[in-house]
Image (spheres, coloured by chain):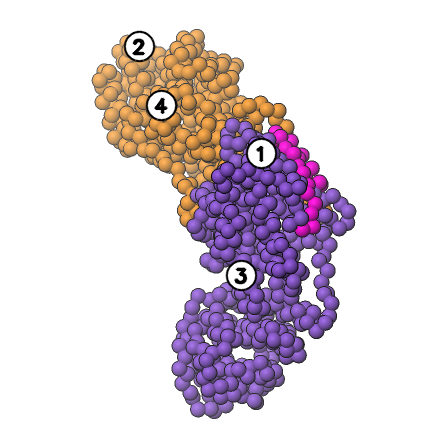
Amino acid sequence: MTKNQIHRARPWPGFPTSKGLGSFGDANCMEQLLVHCANAIESNDATLAQQILWVLNNVAPPDGDSNQRLTCAFLRALIVRASKSGTCKMLAAMANAHCNLSIDIHTFSVIELASFIDLTPWHRFGFTAANAAILEAVEGYSVIHIVDLSLTHCMQIPTLIDAIANRLEGPPLVKLTVAGGATEDVPPMLDLSYQELGCKLVHFARSRNVALEFQAIPSSYADGFASLIEQLRVQHLVYAESGEALVINCHMMLHYIPEETLSSLSNVNSNPYSFESSSTQSLRTMFLNALRVLDPAIVVLVDEDADLTSNNLVCRLRSAFNYLWIPYDTVDTFLPQGSKQRQWYEAGICWKIDNVIAHEGLQRVERLEPKSRWVQRIQNAGFRRVNFGEGTISEVKTMLDEHAAGWGLKKDEDDLVLTWKGHNVIFATTWVPA
Amino acid sequence: MSLHDSASSAAGSSSGSSSSLSSSKPPPSSLQQDIVRHLAGAGYTIRSSDLPQVAQRLERLETAMGSSPADFFQLASDAILYNPSDLASWVDSLLSEFTQLPTCCFEFILAPVDNAWTTAELHEPRVQQNITYEQQSLDRQLTVVTAMEEDSDIRLVHKLMACAECVQRGDFSSATSLIDDMQGLLARVNTVCGIRKVAGHFIDALSRRIFLGIGGGSVDGCGSAFENEILYHHFYEACPYLKFAHFTANQAILEAFDGHDCVHVVDVNLMHGLQWPALIQALALRPGGPPLLRLTGIGSPSPDGRDSLREIGSRLAVLARSVNVRFAFRGVAASRLEDVKPWMLQVNPKEAVAVNSIMQLHCLLISDPTLNSPIETVLNWIRDLNPKILTVVEQEANHNQLDFLDRFTEALYYYSRMFDSLEACRVQPEKALAEIYIQKEIRNVVSCEGSARVERHEPLAKWRRRLSGAGFMSLPLGSNAFKQASMLLTLFSAEGYSVQENDGCLSLGWHSRPLIAASAWQAMPEPGSCVSCLE
């Protein structure tokens, strides 16, 4: 054994020299440490993993600045991941080590969730852009059928109903369909059942003189919302001639549908789309194809602009780190430290990081894809883009003015992108059948 | 009641040293007390006064089995041990089947206690017995076989203690024949598990001591620096002791340096500098930015002319540069720690100083009345540096006792625990080389004397008294150190290790027996005095 062999793993992993870039330099260092730690865990290099974890525990306190809190969340996720791997012990033992690894996910009431959502443009951006586009698309229709596939439990809908009530003569009949129980295990959690939520929405609509019919069809992203699609197909066959405008509103939901890197679900034997011929397509593709068959008046897709689909942990970690610094960075502008809402907010991000880093296979549900890939998919499914009108853009800008200065708006081809300090955060796109 | 003379040669040679066992109840000798302790360690409590009978019965059983292996095999196939704690009546029943002896009642109390040495053997399907019949798989008779293994454990310990006692008395010929016996025993048993593994090393160490005692020269070179480096690295990898030492000391040092812009670490033995990259990285990212860090590494001059201190220092400097920490390294080559003088360390009065000693202080406990006590000399110059913190990690063992037999016994317990813990390491060659590393310690404790014996471990309680007496006060290690150690241990080390907190100090042990202890200290303030540098 040569001397070099002894020291092959011993030198501390190298860092690019960051010439005192202040907080950026530190963030870069933190990222590098996390990357090296992930590599060490994946390659079972217990010594290096221990050393880096020791350092990270000291330099990333859970109550530090935004970089430190971000790193702390990743550190926590790496520890959880390490505790599941072959050479390490069960998570249960961690409790004995006085390590608090649980994430406290809050269950919101409707009022809490509504005001929570309003704190930041993260969801409001998509709501504003989508509602404006939808209103344009459904002009003249007497029946509007909105399929709301949204992570935020229909928080977009009251504003839409308001607008429908105000802007159209003789308000139309509005049918609202949601996928019941779609995201039972993903934050934010609501303390109401969908039946109860539906009742509230119907009452609200009635107070605006809008007749609302609500249905929740039990369906899950895990099989590409197959039962929902099936139901919509049947209804489409029945109502195709009756001048109903079908609106498909997808808000941060579609990225849970398994895509090509989860190929186990898209094999021939487990095709949930009984009407589709067996294929090797991913559920995501099949879902979009199925939407096309429904011939909707408009499809809105709003989602987070990042790539978390890589099967390589380190790639995923880098992508996640270079995107999820944004919510930690923004939170100082709208929530004071120590407030309950801040805890809820950061717990939600922590959950996401945990899912991306510490889970694999079917349990890893946060499979974000960047805008370019979604655009490709939807185009392949037979849709073409629709431009956002000037009115929509100015509405979004007005909304953004209510929030911190770092938020911005970008028009990228025909799409709208929400930015924070110039970085892409959320994209909004609208489509009609080609 | 004397030992049965028809016993095989295996037992015969013990007659010399075991004469103390033949009696009508004299007060138990220290040897007997030791045997009781060892049996207790193997899972049985026996009154000292009953010990001769137990030993006698077991030897007779072995004889009987040895002389008619086929019969025993048949017997063993049929025997079912209903109550593993009732070894006495089982042995008796076997004996009575064999030799048609009248059944005796043994008035022992045999109760299993926490078994120190039988770890996984109960579940080991592969087993060899210490009797020479065809090796057959006896999965059904595991309890029978385990009892036999424990029996051979007891016999080994018995012989080891007897041999050590001979050596202490200067009876080298009896000691030598005991060595032969034991090596014969070892050859017939599975040396992979339990005490038999570490016994081999103790037998080796005793042989060396005997050799020295009869006028032979020391057979041991210290091994080249390169070999020692390899052994150290593999010991570092194979088990958590050194890592625990480094993390815990680093945590205390990091916290002590909080708020200081100029810091200076004095490492009493730099070795390969494995402790420092993590501290440098942690300092680099601490809130408020890194301090100016100076590291002074003390070490022996390299025999082959390499300036290894400087090599390690420059590697650390490269790392520090890459993470934007202003860093300066100084190497101090000294063959004896007591030769180091404070002026060599060039401590700046404005710096916060941390002195770090990982398993070094015990080397200074040589008690030669003609010299100034080295430990006092060193503790004095450490104190003169007025350090913000002194981190001390030491083996938690009493290997510096005057009485050789006491030392031997303690070492036997300590190192068999350590070897047990090493069983959990599955990686080779780390494990094998780590064992050699430990073996060198055993050799030093058992076979060396005078200035050659450097492994003079003392327990934390003694170090507390010593350090308090030298003008230091204890600095509690704090909850972060405990949390870190626990978490890292839980994640990456086998089940069985545990971190314990004891009055501000942390220890790492195997199955609740601490094997290494870490503590932190601060110089006691003396009103009105100033630091004086000795020239």
Between B58 and A77, the residue placed more toward the observer is B58
Left of A47 or right of it: where is A66? left
* Distance between mark 2 and mark 3 Cα atoms: 89 Å
Confirm whether residue B192 shows in the render.
Answer: no
* Distance between mark 1 and mark 4 Cα atoms: 56 Å
Question: To which residue does mark 1 refer?
Answer: B349
Question: To which residue does mark 2 refer?
Answer: A167
Question: To which residue does mark 4 refer?
Answer: A117
Element assignment for label 1: loop
Q: Are marks 1 and 4 in contact (CB under 8 Å)?
A: no
The chain holding disc 4 is: A
Element assignment for label 3: loop
| Colour that chain A carries in the picture | orange
Q: Closer to us: mark 3 or mark 1? A: 1
Label 4 sits on what residue type?
A: Ile
Label 1 sits on what residue type?
A: Pro
Residue B325 drawn in magenta: yes
Q: Are marks 3 and 4 on the same chain?
A: no
Q: Closer to us: mark 2 or mark 3? A: 3
Q: Which mark is residue B398?
A: 3
Q: Are marks 3 and 4 in contact (CB under 8 Å)?
A: no
Q: Are marks 4 and 2 in contact (CB under 8 Å)?
A: no
User: In the figure, A20 relative to A10: above or below?
Assistant: above
x, y (%) of residue A218? 34, 35
